[in-house]
Image (cartoon, rainbow, N blue to C red):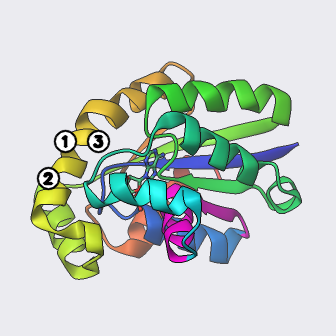
Amino acid sequence: MSAGIILIGPPGVGKGTQAQLLTERRGLVHLSSGDIFRAEIASQSDLGRLAKRYIDEGRLVPNGITIEMMAKRLRTGEVRRNGFILDGFPRTVRQAEALDDDFGDLDLTLMGVVSLTASDDTILQRLAERGRADDDIETVRRRLQVFREETAPVIEHYKGKGIYRPVNSDQTIENVFSDIEECLGQ
Ligand code: AMP
């Protein structure tokens, strides 16, 4: 049995920063779908080449490929021993449903789905500071639109399950972190 949480929210809301703190302080394994794709791109694998076309345009990588990649990571012994943080996955209802199914066979438990929110101004400022290749204004606009259309329904998917935890990310890093800890009941 292994337990974990999902961090969900628009690009630039602070998911990666909070996931890193949860890893440092709680030892959870950080599974960022975006980081995994970027590592595949850097190693010039077939998966990386395929994913790059979508990422460069701010579009989602197809569900089947993404689900298979994340299921593989969730099966590792390290995840079973230490628990996990999913950052950037699931991003579509189809991915969330696949995760629900896999949870049956993998015997994984979701402790909470933390939904981070922040004002548009905060998000744009954080993305400008980060300056990643897909953070140019056109691509950011597309990614925010994809979030509203494809990922916001994932939040609705979890609301009915009693594990949905909204957290205001328009505060200092430490305050956001303590709100996350509080709503996870730790
Ligand atoms: P992120 O680092 O989470 O902002 O992700 C960067 C990019 O990777 C996204 O804009 C998508 O193109 C792709 N990506 C990351 N996670 C997923 C996912 N769960 N499903 C589909 N595409 C994803």
Magenta highlight on residue 29: yes
Q: CA distance from mark 2 to mark 3?
A: 10 Å
Q: Position of residue 14 (x, y in %)?
A: 37, 64
Q: Say left or right for 177 vs 186.
A: left
**Measuring 27% from the left and 66% from the top, which residue is drawn there?**
134
Q: Note whether 137 is above or below 173 in the view shown.
A: above
Contact? badges 3 and 1 (CB < 8 Å): yes
Contact? badges 2 and 3 (CB < 8 Å): no
Q: CA distance from mark 1 to mark 2?
A: 6 Å
Mark 3: which secondary structure? helix
The amino acid pointed to by label 3 is Phe
Mark 1: which secondary structure? helix
Viewer-proximal residue among 49 and 26? 49
- Number of residues whose C-alpha sits closer than 10 Å to that of mark 1, classed few (under 14), some (14–19) or many (20 or more): some
For the magenta stretch, what is the residue range?
A: 27-42
**Measuring 73% from the left and 70% from the top, which residue is drawn there?**
27
Q: Position of residue 145 (x, y in %)?
A: 19, 41
Residue identifier under label 3 = 147
Q: Position of residue 89 (x, y in %)?
A: 52, 46
Residue identifier under label 1 = 145
Q: CA distance from mark 3 to mark 1?
A: 5 Å
Mark 2: which secondary structure? helix
Residue identifier under label 2 = 141
